[in-house]
Image: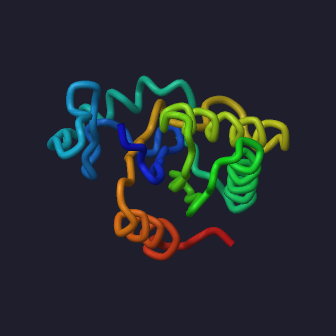
Amino acid sequence: MREPLAYFLTWRTFGTWLHGDDRGSVDRKHKTFGSPLLSPEPAFVQRNRNRMSGPAVVLNQRQRHLVDAAIRERCRHAGWVLLALNVRTNHVHAVVAASEPAEQVMVSLKAWATRRLRDDGVAAGKIWARHGSTRYIWDEAGLENTCLYVTDLQDDPPA
């Protein structure tokens, strides 16, 4: 079986994009690539907001820097190739070449980032939303386009 060149990993901070949001979302029944997003539903957003166990997490500049450093350190430590990274206020994009499964890589990156934020005393409680997006990159053109998207086509890149 052919291996992907890299993974395009994206995960959000806790509470910043709830099911029913106008931007669309996926759930356990609608998570296949290319399947339609859930329709906006304000009442569903409010129910989800009421069920949250803590406040929504928006990363400040210091927190973004710490997450960035933790992800870079984890990739070096594991021997993974970090091809692109952009830590945003409410989500993270990473393009990583690794022999481990995409889900395992994402879980590890989230864990290292969480530990760094907690060790530095700048975060408590839930930091990340459950799971995230794991897309496979199969060819050089896809890899180039994805890295360009992550590094150059985002607003307000981290300093």
Q: Is residue 150 visible?
A: yes
| x and y, in percent, of residue 105 in the image | 57, 38
Q: Is residue 55 visible?
A: no
Rendered view: 147 above or below 52:
below
| x and y, in percent, of residue 97 in the image | 55, 51
Give the position of the N terminus as an image quadrant.
top left
Rendered view: 97 above or below 117:
below
Q: Residue furthest right?
A: 120
State the residue in front, 80 or 128: 80
Q: Is residue 122 left or right of residue 85?
A: right
| x and y, in percent, of residue 96 in the image | 55, 52
| x and y, in percent, of residue 140 in the image | 39, 66
Identify the residue at image location x=28%, y=42%: 25
Q: Is residue 140 left or right of residue 127?
A: left
Identify the residue at image location x=35%, y=69%: 141
State the residue in front, 81 or 134: 81
Q: Quadrant of residue 89?
A: bottom right
State the residue in front, 70 or 90: 70
Q: Quadrant of residue 124?
A: top right
Identify the residue at image location x=53%, y=24%: 53
Identify the residue at image location x=19%, y=43%: 37
Q: Residue furthest front?
A: 1
Give the position of the C terminus as an image quadrant.
bottom right
Q: Is residue 31 left or right of residue 8?
A: left
